[in-house]
Amino acid sequence: MTNEEILREINSLPPEGQRLLESVLASLRQLYSRSPSSIQPATDIRSESFIGMWRDRDDMSNSSEWVRKLRESEWGG
């Protein structure tokens, strides 16, 4: 699509559509104006503090069985 075609499409929108498009463009400008240093790198989930927090619980040694029992007690069946 050429710039002229895009402009024609924008101009053919009702005022409400043009305002919505303006809002979308502002959001895109904000999203793409961030500097690379402001974007946080992904962390390795294995280093999160909650990993392994229940490793010493005997009742959860088999997590699938534990969940199955919990569901049965909560919802029956």
Image: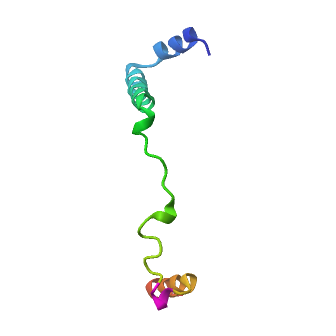
Query: Which quarter of the rendering shows the C terminus?
Result: bottom right
Q: Residue drawn at (43%, 77%), measured in percent from left and top?
A: 53
**Is residue 30 placed above or below 5 in the rendered structure?**
below
The image position of residue 15, as x and y in percent, is 38, 19
Q: Residue drawn at (44%, 80%), measured in percent from left and top?
A: 54
Q: Which residues are magenta?
A: 56-60
The image position of residue 60, as x and y in percent, is 50, 86
> 26 left or right of 77?
left
Q: Residue drawn at (45%, 29%), measured in percent from left and top?
A: 32
Query: Which quarter of the rendering shows the N terminus?
Result: top right
The image position of residue 24, as x and y in percent, is 42, 29
Q: Residue furthest right?
A: 1
Residue 58 inside the magenta-drawn segment = yes
**Is residue 48 placed above or below 35 in the rendered structure?**
below
| Prevailing SS of the magenta stretch | helix
Q: Residue drawn at (46%, 19%), measured in percent from left and top?
A: 13
